[in-house]
Image (spheres, rainbow, N blue to C red):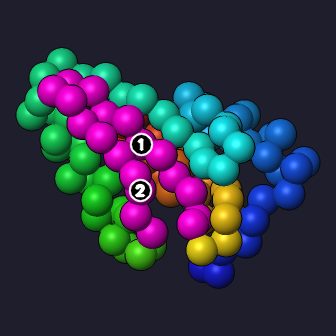
Amino acid sequence: MKPYLLENEELKELSAKIGGWRIMTNHIEREFNFSNFIEAFSFMTKIALICEKHNHHPNWENVYSKVIIKLSTHDLGGITNLDQTIASEINDIFEK
């Protein structure tokens, strides 16, 4: 998939497509909370495999049971269709 920057109209519709994510100026972000560190780390491991598959890696942090993920396509300077795809796949994993 060749990434392209999302246009203003696409960005306005994005929050409905990827529930739970905050649309920021140059990235999207979401906080995930778990019962403990093992659940949080297991989730991060699953996400790492998705990101590696797409060769697109997040900025993220983990403190005990909380994981914060920020997605942006730095090469293009903003939010792209690739960020949207990965956010959607992350939501699918979280909801399972």
Q: Is residue 62 magenta?
A: yes
Q: Which mark is residue 58?
A: 2
Say left or right for 42 vs 57: left
Outermost residue on the bottom side: it is: 2
Question: Circles 1 and 2: CB distance less than 8 Å?
Answer: yes
Say left or right for 52 vs 24: left
- Gap in Å between the C-alphas at discs 1 and 2? 6 Å
What residue is at 47 percent from the left and 40 percent from the top? Answer: 91
Q: Residues within 10 Å of mark 1 (few under 14, many from 20)?
A: many
Q: Is residue 70 above or below residue 86?
A: above
Instruction: Return the x and y of residue 89 as percentages of the image width and height.
Output: 47, 52
Instruction: Return the x and y of residue 64 as percentages of the image width and height.
Output: 15, 27
What residue is at 67 percent from the left and 59 percent from the top? Answer: 78
The answer to whether residue 92 shows anywhere in this view is no
Q: Name the residue tied to disc 1.
A: 69
Q: Nearer the viewer, residue 76 or 51?
A: 76
Q: Is residue 7 magenta?
A: no
What residue is at 81 percent from the left and 41 percent from the top? Answer: 13
- SS at mark 1 in the image: strand
Image quadrant in which you'd find residue 39 = top left
- Give the magenta range: 56-74
Instruction: Return the x and y of residue 2 as percentages of the image width and height.
Output: 65, 81
Q: Tell me which amino acid carries mark 1.
A: Ile
Say left or right for 51 vs 89: left
Q: Is residue 42 above or below residue 57?
A: above
Which quadrant holds the N terminus?
Answer: bottom right
Q: Which mark is residue 13?
A: none
Instruction: Return the x and y of residue 57 as percentages of the image width and height.
Output: 40, 64
Q: Residues within 10 Å of mark 2 (few under 14, many from 20)?
A: some
